[in-house]
Amino acid sequence: MSNLRITCLVSLFLLSTTVTVSADIVPPHSGSAGRPFKLYSQIQLTVENVPKSMVLILLGGRNQLLQIAHSDEVIRVSGDSNLYLALENTLSKPFNYDKDAHKLIWLRQYRQDDIPASPGSPPPPMLVRGKVKTVGPKNYVLESRLGY
């Protein structure tokens, strides 16, 4: 692990910053409820209290970049994907997973099964709130709480 990464992680521990995430299930577009196949909703994660030097990154299949979010921005999860935390100034521009994989801290995997589906009308709205907490010198965990 590079000295820069160690220094940044130690400084984050000292600042004891907590990253919080809240999410809502967003129903699919209206008017499509009569179709004979399943309709999937979308999870919107609203990210707050992210340190200025860090970003959340959502990667889809084949590690395709879906979205990068800073504090108070929304991440939209609509299928199989993985959520990562990273120091923004260490990432390649433009983002390249092959070069940056060792710089990403994995937080959570989303599967299509995690997103509510409905053959008819959309499911009721659901609220998800969570916090990113450190659990070791190189490990973070996304703790989520579900409510209606």
Image: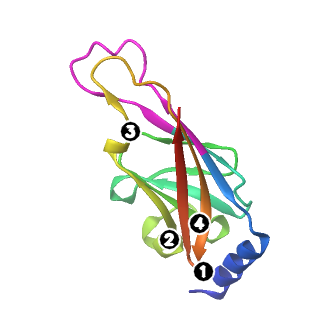
Q: Which is nearer the N-term, disc 4 or disc 3?
A: 4
Residue of label 1? 137
Q: Residue at x 65, y 83 (%)?
A: 6
User: What is the CA distance from the residue labelled 4 to the residue labelled 1?
Assistant: 14 Å
State the count of labels: 4
The spot of residue 116 in percent (x, y) is 37, 34
Q: Which residues are magenta?
A: 22-43
- Compare residues 46 and 126 and report the one nearer the observer: 126
The spot of residue 47 in percent (x, y) is 64, 48
Identify residue type, mark 3. Answer: Ile
Q: Which is nearer the N-term, disc 1 or disc 2?
A: 2
Secondary structure under tag 3 reads loop
On the rendered structure, is 30 left or right of 47? left
Residue of label 2? 100
Judge whether 29 appears above or below 9 on screen: above
Residue of label 3? 115
Quadrant for residue 138, please give it. bottom right
Secondary structure under tag 1 reads loop
Identify residue type, mark 4. Answer: Ala
Secondary structure under tag 4 reads strand
On the rendered structure, is 7 left or right of 31? right
Residue occupying the far left of the picture: 36
User: What is the CA distance from the residue labelled 1 to the residue labelled 3?
Assistant: 31 Å
Quadrant for residue 53, please give it. bottom right
Residue of label 4? 86
User: Mark 1 packing: few (<14 Cα in 10 Å), some, or many (20+)?
Assistant: few
